[in-house]
Amino acid sequence: MFTRSLNKNLLVKRVTQVRNLSIHEYRSASLLRQYGVGTPKGIAAYTPEEAYEAAKKLGTDELVIKAQALTGGRGKGHFDTGYKSGVHLINGAEEARDIAKEMLHHNLITKQSGAAGKPVSAVYIVERKYAEHEAYLSIVMDRKNQSTLVIASSEGGMSVEDVAKNHPEAIKKYAVNIDEGISDELATKIASGLGFTEDAVSKAATDIKKLYQIFKEKDATQIEINPLTETKEHDVECVDAKFNFDNSAAYRQKDVFAWRDYSQEDPDEVTASKYGLNFIKLDGNIGCLVNGAGLAMATMDVVKLYGGAPANFLDVGGASTPETIEKAFELIMGEKKVSAIFVNIFGGIVRCDYVADGLISATKNLGLKVPVVARLRGTNLELAQKKIAESGLPKLYLFTDLDEAAQKVVELGAK
């Protein structure tokens, strides 16, 4: 029996997994400057005193201080201390120092961050820009058409989701051939729809081409500028920027990936990545250890089908060893709510006997007190069955049928 009726909550959690590198706003601004794209002058600070010095160095008292945390909606968020908002208009260096004290080394909680929030280890002090008009622009991968897509709106400075909901006609999409890039004609067409004055359209078109150059040369998966602002002087400035980059390109984008901020990620998921494991925490009680993303999704489906709730998504990949299997168990058991573990391995590149060794070792070394149900098929299955049978471990159950295994682990997890 097989199902693809994936629970919607699982789907939401899966698509929010970190598969692309996100960088802080001040890093994005640095990249924009490298390519000659207009962006307000700004300096990152890691202590209140550095914030004071940064504000002095910028040479104006009309400033903005922004908490650097990888979450949206910072301005509407609050800190774990109760302090309101991660974005403040300030007047001078003294205020920069005072507000930096409220932000630094505290967690910023937003609608996107989760209840714990995101730690703030830096603040970004930038000169304040007065907008004549604010627009929205992003460049994303269009996997359906195997190309890239520019999404633009004359309504910027607000949530693009709200614009899409309330004024869908204000959002325009432009397909871009990934090899041909953005022509002068297309750049002007996009810029002309942003609501800028005639004086700013040509500047915006130039910046759009430069943004696409960053997107392609740096292996970005998303560049989002919100707002893309026409100032009162009719200059065009990227006032806020969100950049994501393809993890698969880390080997050739070492300068960008050096900016990865591990403090913004779940520590267990960071540890998992070091061992070549793809690990995401969920809300259930059935720990899942599987090889292959597709099989992992099917495994979570079948657990849900029989009334259980997966506690995680964990793909051990194709190069697992007994040591990495044991590490996977350690990550799963880090969650107190786990009451049973489901191991579902189709042994191709991963040998079933390696999985058995990892199972036995983890059960003994980690002192596992919860039952483990293993469904193994494939390479060296007979040897794996023999090892498990001879291990004498009472809470280790072996199956070859997926449905029987799923029913058993849900039953054991409910006890």
Image (spheres, helix red, strand yellow):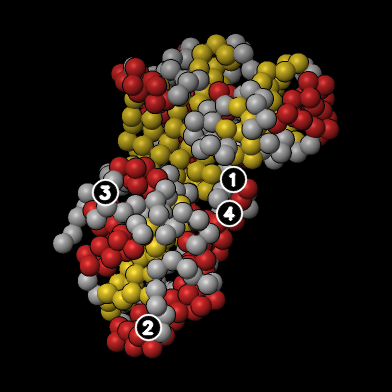
Observer-side mark, 1 or 3, equals 3
Q: Residues within 10 Å of mark 4 (few under 14, many from 20)?
A: few
Location of the N terminus by quadrant is bottom left
Residue at 57% of width from left, 14% of height from top? 131
**Amino acid type of the residue tagged 4 in the rendering:** Pro
Are the residues tagged 4 and 1 within 8 Å (C-beta)?
no
Q: Judging from the image, what secondary structure is the residue with disc 1 in? A: helix
Q: Is residue 92 above or below residue 109?
A: above
Are the residues tagged 1 and 3 within 8 Å (C-beta)?
no
**If you read the primary sequence from the N terminus, does the residue marked by circle 3 or circle 4 appear first?**
3
Residue that label 2 marks: 388
Residue 6: assigned label? 3
Distance Cα–Cα, label 4 vs label 1:
9 Å
Distance Cα–Cα, label 2 vs label 1:
40 Å
Q: Residue furthest front?
A: 415
Are the residues tagged 3 and 4 within 8 Å (C-beta)?
no
Are the residues tagged 2 and 4 within 8 Å (C-beta)?
no
Q: Judging from the image, what secondary structure is the residue with disc 3 in? A: loop
Residue that label 1 marks: 264
Q: Is residue 139 visible?
A: yes
Q: Nearer the viewer, residue 127 or 175?
A: 127
- Residue 412 location, quadrant: bottom left
Are the residues tagged 2 and 1 within 8 Å (C-beta)?
no
Location of the C terminus by quadrant is bottom left
**If you read the primary sequence from the N terminus, does the residue marked by circle 2 or circle 4 appear first?**
4
**Amino acid type of the residue tagged 2 in the rendering:** Ile
